Image: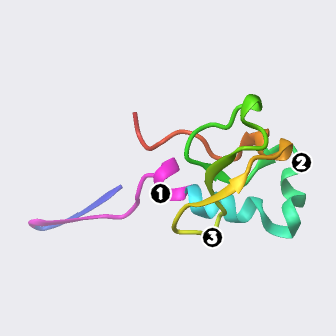
Amino acid sequence: TVLVYGDSQRPLTTDHTPDSESNRVRSLGSLKGGELLKGHFTPLEFRKRPLERELGSMVLYREPYMTGWAYKVLTHPDLRLPLVSGHGKR
């Protein structure tokens, strides 16, 4: 929605995309120790989708509140579906 007043215009809304909302959604999903996800999804974000053959190896990941990336040993719970997938508008 755009407000037009005379010669000026101002956007009243913004698009909700994975890029703009992923941190908020993943943070909410990790509340109460992941109780909201019921063990079906992971709030973690991985640099690339982890594969079962990579179990036990070091992978880049970040928690919902992290701004940078860190390494961790990939475990079986990390193979759950990501809570947020995709990158912005197509």
Q: Residue at x 63, y 58 (%)?
A: 71
Residue 20 part of the magenta segment: yes
Count the labels in the image. Answer: 3
Instruction: Point out the residue furthest to the front here.
Output: 57
Q: Is residue 69 above or below residue 87?
A: below
Quadrant in the rendering for residue 52? top right
Q: Nearer the viewer, residue 14 or 55?
A: 55
Q: Which residue is mark 2?
A: 39
Q: Mark 2–mark 3 contact, CB under 8 Å?
A: no
For the C terminus, the image quarter is top left
Instruction: Name the residue nearer the viewer: 11 or 61.
Output: 61
Magenta span of residues: 7-21
Q: Residue furthest top?
A: 53
How far is disc 1 from disc 3 in space, using C-alphas?
14 Å
Q: Quadrant of the N terminus?
A: bottom left
Residue at (60% x, 41% y) in the render = 85
Q: Report x, y in % for residue 40.
A: 85, 42
Numbered badge on residue 65 = 3
Distance between the alpha carbons at the discs numbered 2 and 3: 19 Å
Q: Is residue 83 above or below residue 32?
A: above
Q: For the residue marked with disc 2, what is the amino acid? A: Gly
Residue count near mark 1 (Cα–Cα under 10 Å), binned few <14, some 14–19, many ≥20: few
| Residues at circles 1 and 3 in contact by the CB criterion of under 8 Å | no
The x, y position of residue 74, in whole percent, is 75, 47
**10 falls in the magenta region:** yes
Q: Residue at x 70, y 32 (%)?
A: 51
* Disc ID at residue 62: none
| Amino acid type, callout 3 | Tyr
Q: Is residue 81 above or below residue 17?
A: above
Q: Earlier in the sequence, mark 2 or mark 1?
A: 1
The label nearer to you, 1 versus 3, is: 3
